[in-house]
Image (cartoon, rainbow, N blue to C red):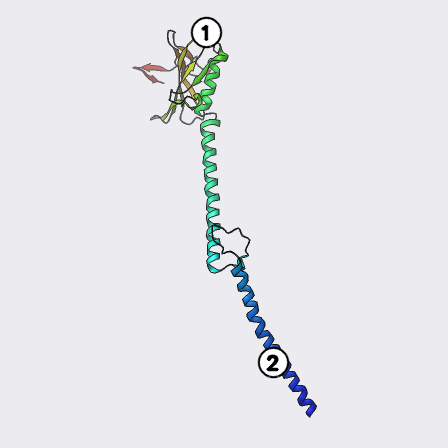
Amino acid sequence: MKSNTLAILRRCNALNASSIVRAQLVPQRFASTQSETSKRRAVTPFNDDGHVPWTQLSAGEKAGRATQQTFNFGMVIVGLVMTGGVGYFFWEEVMSPDSKVAYFNRAVDRIKQHPRCVEVLGDGKKITAHGEETGNKWRRARPIASTESKDAQGNDHLLIQFHIQGPKGHGMVHMHLVKLAGHHEYEYKYFFVDVAGHPRIYLENSETAPLKPGEKPAYKLFGIKLG
Protein backbone atom coordinates (compact mmCIF):
# COMPACT_ATOMS: atom_id res chain seq x y z
CA MET A 1 0.00 0.00 0.00
CA LYS A 2 2.74 2.38 0.92
CA SER A 3 4.47 1.77 -2.39
CA ASN A 4 1.23 2.50 -4.33
CA THR A 5 0.68 5.66 -2.35
CA LEU A 6 4.19 6.84 -3.04
CA ALA A 7 3.79 6.21 -6.78
CA ILE A 8 0.57 8.21 -6.88
CA LEU A 9 2.19 11.09 -5.01
CA ARG A 10 5.12 11.10 -7.45
CA ARG A 11 2.79 11.26 -10.45
CA CYS A 12 0.83 14.15 -8.91
CA ASN A 13 4.05 16.02 -8.26
CA ALA A 14 5.16 15.46 -11.83
CA LEU A 15 1.83 16.78 -13.21
CA ASN A 16 1.98 19.83 -11.00
CA ALA A 17 5.52 20.57 -12.08
CA SER A 18 4.53 20.26 -15.76
CA SER A 19 1.59 22.65 -15.26
CA ILE A 20 3.82 25.15 -13.55
CA VAL A 21 6.36 25.04 -16.41
CA ARG A 22 3.63 25.54 -19.03
CA ALA A 23 2.16 28.44 -17.10
CA GLN A 24 5.55 30.05 -17.03
CA LEU A 25 6.22 29.48 -20.75
CA VAL A 26 2.99 31.11 -21.98
CA PRO A 27 3.77 34.59 -20.62
CA GLN A 28 7.32 34.24 -21.92
CA ARG A 29 6.12 33.48 -25.45
CA PHE A 30 3.62 36.34 -25.35
CA ALA A 31 6.32 38.64 -24.03
CA SER A 32 8.70 37.59 -26.82
CA THR A 33 6.01 38.26 -29.46
CA GLN A 34 5.36 41.66 -27.98
CA SER A 35 9.06 42.42 -27.88
CA GLU A 36 9.42 41.48 -31.59
CA THR A 37 6.50 43.77 -32.44
CA SER A 38 7.92 46.58 -30.39
CA LYS A 39 11.36 46.17 -31.96
CA ARG A 40 10.18 46.68 -35.58
CA ARG A 41 9.17 50.02 -37.01
CA ALA A 42 5.47 50.81 -37.13
CA VAL A 43 4.03 50.14 -40.60
CA THR A 44 2.30 53.11 -42.28
CA PRO A 45 0.99 53.74 -45.82
CA PHE A 46 4.13 55.82 -46.46
CA ASN A 47 6.84 53.32 -45.39
CA ASP A 48 5.15 49.96 -46.01
CA ASP A 49 7.29 47.84 -48.34
CA GLY A 50 5.39 44.58 -47.77
CA HIS A 51 8.24 43.06 -45.75
CA VAL A 52 6.16 42.53 -42.60
CA PRO A 53 3.68 39.61 -42.99
CA TRP A 54 -0.02 40.40 -42.86
CA THR A 55 -0.53 38.24 -39.77
CA GLN A 56 1.93 40.35 -37.78
CA LEU A 57 0.24 43.66 -38.53
CA SER A 58 -1.99 45.41 -36.06
CA ALA A 59 -5.53 46.47 -37.01
CA GLY A 60 -4.35 50.01 -37.77
CA GLU A 61 -1.39 48.76 -39.83
CA LYS A 62 -3.67 46.47 -41.84
CA ALA A 63 -5.93 49.42 -42.60
CA GLY A 64 -2.87 51.43 -43.69
CA ARG A 65 -1.64 48.68 -46.00
CA ALA A 66 -5.10 48.31 -47.54
CA THR A 67 -5.21 52.09 -48.12
CA GLN A 68 -1.79 52.02 -49.76
CA GLN A 69 -2.71 49.15 -52.09
CA THR A 70 -5.97 50.85 -53.07
CA PHE A 71 -4.10 54.07 -53.85
CA ASN A 72 -1.49 52.20 -55.92
CA PHE A 73 -4.20 50.42 -57.90
CA GLY A 74 -5.94 53.74 -58.55
CA MET A 75 -2.68 55.25 -59.81
CA VAL A 76 -2.21 52.34 -62.22
CA ILE A 77 -5.72 52.88 -63.61
CA VAL A 78 -5.11 56.62 -64.02
CA GLY A 79 -1.80 55.91 -65.77
CA LEU A 80 -3.47 53.52 -68.21
CA VAL A 81 -6.22 56.02 -68.99
CA MET A 82 -3.72 58.83 -69.57
CA THR A 83 -1.54 56.62 -71.76
CA GLY A 84 -4.56 55.67 -73.85
CA GLY A 85 -5.60 59.31 -74.16
CA VAL A 86 -2.13 60.40 -75.29
CA GLY A 87 -1.99 57.53 -77.77
CA TYR A 88 -5.41 58.43 -79.21
CA PHE A 89 -4.47 62.12 -79.48
CA PHE A 90 -1.15 61.25 -81.15
CA TRP A 91 -2.89 59.01 -83.68
CA GLU A 92 -5.66 61.48 -84.49
CA GLU A 93 -3.39 64.54 -84.76
CA VAL A 94 -0.21 63.05 -86.22
CA MET A 95 -0.31 59.45 -87.44
CA SER A 96 -3.81 59.20 -88.95
CA PRO A 97 -3.90 59.60 -92.76
CA ASP A 98 -6.73 62.14 -92.26
CA SER A 99 -4.87 64.24 -89.67
CA LYS A 100 -3.93 67.87 -90.28
CA VAL A 101 -0.25 67.00 -89.99
CA ALA A 102 -0.57 64.30 -92.66
CA TYR A 103 -2.24 66.67 -95.13
CA PHE A 104 0.30 69.37 -94.29
CA ASN A 105 3.24 67.05 -95.01
CA ARG A 106 1.72 65.79 -98.27
CA ALA A 107 0.98 69.34 -99.39
CA VAL A 108 4.55 70.49 -98.74
CA ASP A 109 5.95 67.52 -100.67
CA ARG A 110 3.72 68.34 -103.64
CA ILE A 111 4.71 72.01 -103.59
CA LYS A 112 8.40 71.11 -103.61
CA GLN A 113 7.85 68.99 -106.73
CA HIS A 114 5.46 71.32 -108.57
CA PRO A 115 7.25 73.02 -111.51
CA ARG A 116 5.38 76.33 -111.20
CA CYS A 117 5.92 76.51 -107.40
CA VAL A 118 9.62 75.79 -107.81
CA GLU A 119 9.80 78.50 -110.49
CA VAL A 120 8.44 81.26 -108.21
CA LEU A 121 9.78 80.02 -104.84
CA GLY A 122 13.16 78.55 -105.80
CA ASP A 123 14.91 75.22 -105.37
CA GLY A 124 12.45 72.64 -104.02
CA LYS A 125 15.07 71.23 -101.66
CA LYS A 126 15.31 74.63 -99.96
CA ILE A 127 11.58 75.26 -99.66
CA THR A 128 10.31 75.18 -96.07
CA ALA A 129 6.84 75.45 -94.55
CA HIS A 130 5.51 76.42 -91.15
CA GLY A 131 2.36 77.46 -89.36
CA GLU A 132 1.27 80.83 -88.08
CA GLU A 133 3.90 83.30 -86.93
CA THR A 134 4.37 83.37 -83.14
CA GLY A 135 6.82 84.83 -80.68
CA ASN A 136 8.49 81.42 -80.38
CA LYS A 137 11.81 81.24 -82.24
CA TRP A 138 11.42 77.50 -82.84
CA ARG A 139 9.76 76.97 -86.18
CA ARG A 140 8.25 73.63 -85.16
CA ALA A 141 6.29 75.38 -82.41
CA ARG A 142 4.33 77.44 -84.95
CA PRO A 143 0.79 76.06 -85.11
CA ILE A 144 -0.88 75.17 -88.38
CA ALA A 145 -4.08 77.19 -88.81
CA SER A 146 -6.98 74.84 -89.44
CA THR A 147 -10.76 74.73 -89.08
CA GLU A 148 -13.06 71.71 -88.99
CA SER A 149 -16.81 71.97 -89.50
CA LYS A 150 -19.88 70.06 -90.64
CA ASP A 151 -22.50 71.51 -92.95
CA ALA A 152 -26.27 70.98 -92.96
CA GLN A 153 -25.93 68.02 -95.36
CA GLY A 154 -23.58 66.21 -92.97
CA ASN A 155 -20.44 66.84 -95.03
CA ASP A 156 -17.19 67.39 -93.10
CA HIS A 157 -15.04 70.37 -94.09
CA LEU A 158 -11.34 70.80 -93.29
CA LEU A 159 -9.60 74.11 -94.06
CA ILE A 160 -5.82 74.39 -93.63
CA GLN A 161 -3.59 77.42 -94.07
CA PHE A 162 0.19 77.73 -93.65
CA HIS A 163 3.24 79.67 -94.83
CA ILE A 164 5.68 78.53 -97.50
CA GLN A 165 9.19 79.98 -97.88
CA GLY A 166 11.74 79.55 -100.63
CA PRO A 167 14.97 81.20 -101.81
CA LYS A 168 13.02 83.43 -104.23
CA GLY A 169 10.04 84.39 -102.11
CA HIS A 170 7.34 83.73 -99.53
CA GLY A 171 3.82 82.48 -100.09
CA MET A 172 0.61 81.33 -98.38
CA VAL A 173 -0.95 77.93 -98.93
CA HIS A 174 -4.72 77.42 -98.70
CA MET A 175 -6.45 74.04 -98.69
CA HIS A 176 -10.12 73.11 -98.46
CA LEU A 177 -11.01 69.42 -98.20
CA VAL A 178 -14.49 67.91 -98.04
CA LYS A 179 -15.56 64.50 -96.77
CA LEU A 180 -19.03 63.77 -98.11
CA ALA A 181 -21.59 62.25 -95.76
CA GLY A 182 -21.22 58.46 -95.74
CA HIS A 183 -17.70 58.58 -97.18
CA HIS A 184 -14.44 57.83 -95.39
CA GLU A 185 -11.94 59.98 -97.30
CA TYR A 186 -11.51 63.69 -97.88
CA GLU A 187 -11.46 65.14 -101.37
CA TYR A 188 -9.90 68.44 -102.38
CA LYS A 189 -12.20 71.36 -103.09
CA TYR A 190 -9.16 73.52 -103.69
CA PHE A 191 -5.45 73.64 -102.93
CA PHE A 192 -3.52 76.69 -104.10
CA VAL A 193 -0.44 78.81 -103.36
CA ASP A 194 -0.41 82.60 -103.35
CA VAL A 195 2.96 84.30 -103.88
CA ALA A 196 3.14 88.09 -104.04
CA GLY A 197 3.67 89.37 -107.58
CA HIS A 198 2.61 86.08 -109.23
CA PRO A 199 -0.69 84.58 -110.37
CA ARG A 200 -2.34 82.10 -108.01
CA ILE A 201 -0.99 78.57 -108.45
CA TYR A 202 -3.65 75.85 -108.22
CA LEU A 203 -2.54 72.34 -107.36
CA GLU A 204 -6.16 71.17 -106.87
CA ASN A 205 -9.39 72.81 -107.98
CA SER A 206 -12.63 70.88 -108.04
CA GLU A 207 -14.28 73.64 -110.07
CA THR A 208 -12.01 72.97 -113.05
CA ALA A 209 -11.21 69.28 -112.45
CA PRO A 210 -12.16 66.93 -115.32
CA LEU A 211 -15.19 64.73 -114.78
CA LYS A 212 -14.63 61.18 -113.61
CA PRO A 213 -15.97 58.28 -115.72
CA GLY A 214 -19.75 58.13 -115.31
CA GLU A 215 -19.91 61.46 -113.39
CA LYS A 216 -22.49 64.00 -114.54
CA PRO A 217 -21.61 67.70 -114.81
CA ALA A 218 -22.91 69.92 -112.01
CA TYR A 219 -24.65 73.19 -112.78
CA LYS A 220 -24.66 76.31 -110.63
CA LEU A 221 -27.31 78.96 -110.11
CA PHE A 222 -26.27 82.09 -108.17
CA GLY A 223 -23.23 80.24 -106.86
CA ILE A 224 -25.24 77.18 -105.71
CA LYS A 225 -24.30 73.83 -107.21
CA LEU A 226 -27.26 71.95 -108.69
CA GLY A 227 -27.47 68.29 -109.57
What percent of the width, then of the height, locates residue 152? 33, 26
Residues packed near mark 2 inside 10 Å, few (<14), some (14 to 19) or many (20 plus): few
Identify the element where label 1 is drawn.
helix
* Residue closer to the observer: 209 or 177: 177
Given the image, on which type of amino acid does mark 2 rest?
Answer: Asn
The quadrant where residue 203 appears? top left
Indicate the quadrant containing the N terminus: top left, top right, bottom left or bottom right.
Answer: bottom right
Q: CA distance from mark 2 to mark 1?
A: 116 Å
Identify the element where label 2 is drawn.
helix
* Residue closer to the observer: 97 or 19: 19
Q: Is residue 6 above or below residue 15?
A: below
The circle drawn on residue 16 is: 2
Residue at 40% x, 13% y is 171
Residues packed near mark 1 inside 10 Å, few (<14), some (14 to 19) or many (20 plus): few
Left/right placement of residue 134 relative to residue 70 reads left
Given the image, on which type of amino acid does mark 1 rest?
Answer: Glu
The quadrant where residue 176 appears? top left
According to the image, label 1 marks what residue?
Answer: 119
Residues at circles 2 and 1 in contact by the CB criterion of under 8 Å: no
Residue at 55% x, 64% y is 33
Residue at 60% x, 75% y is 21
